[in-house]
Amino acid sequence: MDRFDAMQAFARVVEAGSFTKAADTLHISKTSITQLVQQLEARLRVKLLNRTTRRVHLTADGAAYYARVLRILADVEEAETGLASAAAVPRGRLRVDVPSPLARMLLVPALPDFHARYPEIQLDMGVSDRRVDLVGENVDCVLRGGHIANPSLIARHVADLQLGVYAAPGYLALAGRPEHPRMLEDTHHRIVGFLWARAGRTFPYAMRRGDEQVHVQGRYAFAVDDGNAYLAAGLAGLGVLWLPDYMARPHRASGELVPLFEDWQLAPMPLYLAYAPNRHVGARLRAFIDWVVALLAEHTPVGRPRT
């Protein structure tokens, strides 16, 4: 038994909550990872995990051992990445998940710069607006709009997405131009609904003008859970949109979208980069975080909170 492999297998089972998921993330068979953990328990002469048909749980001895294993694994990675050559050239596979519009409009176009700086990093980018199980899916970090609801994650506020309200000229020609946000609650007006992954439903938008504040829920005939499809629906004239500036800018310039309620203020949407607390921030993850923060500072700088 390779002791390091066994400790790594044990840690991944704990993080994934099952032998099957852990085997998938390590790209080995379930039989192999089960044998590694069993051999580790035999060597230590303690039971580390309680196994059920649905999930595994740490024993008291397992919890104490897991805490030490995390430190050992982190120290090994730190020792490797702390070498002069590794520090100069971060390398290895990095798995991230980002919202689809942010990937299409900002991150992917800028990737030639990232790969020019870090040619030894292999980047696997999931593009979605869904909720991601960082541990179970072995994802190093995610970028998400809105506050991170999971208190177990480490979340860094990296940008504020300034929002505006828009509609396609074709929509306005049919429904008329709403002069007040409350008019979006009328039966002849429609919004495009965005289904947030954390709740699977739409939420009202808060808007303010001077001392007047409204929360607009709106009516929709179509709702979607993907940012690119949300934008496409608005461009097709299916309803009114709430969009970050970086998404609306090219379509506003081309005349495909018309801004509405420009004398109203909308609270910006915070953008967070999050990772699991037991995910060691090695050189490659640190390189990606620093690159993303610098890129977003150019396009969507962190703003002052609205009062």
Image (cartoon, rainbow, N blue to C red):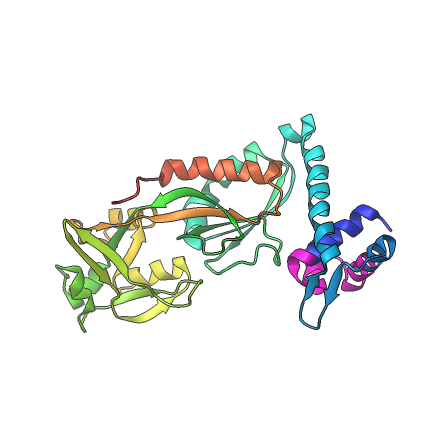
Q: Please identify the residue farthest to the left as the structure is shown.
A: 179
Say which residue appears at 31% left-offset and 53% top-offset. 243
Tell whether 285 sits left or right of 298: right
Q: Please identify the residue farthest to the front as the structure is shown.
A: 60
Image mark count: 0
Q: Please identify the residue farthest to the top as the structure is shown.
A: 84
Q: Quadrant of the C terminus?
A: top left
The one nearer the camera, 265 or 104, is: 265
- Horizontal and vertical percent position of residue 121: 62, 40
Tell me if residue 222 comes above or below residue 80 in the rendering. below
Tell me if residue 54 comes above or below residue 114 in the rendering. below
- The answer to whether residue 282 is magenta is no
- Horizontal and vertical percent position of residue 173: 16, 64
Q: Quadrant of residue 75?
A: top right
Residue 290 visible in the snapshot: yes
Tell whether 4 sits left or right of 228: right
Say which residue appears at 62% left-offset and 59% top-offset. 136
- Horizontal and vertical percent position of residue 211: 14, 51
Say which residue appears at 72% left-offset and 63% top-offset. 19
Tell whether 253 sits left or right of 194: left
Prevailing secondary structure of the magenta residues? helix
The one nearer the camera, 23 or 206, is: 206
Residue 27 visible in the snapshot: no
- The answer to whether residue 24 is magenta is yes
- Horizontal and vertical percent position of residue 54: 67, 71
Say which residue appears at 43% left-offset and 37% top-offset. 295
- Per the rendered image, the range of residues in magenta is 14-37
Q: Quadrant of residue 196?
A: bottom left
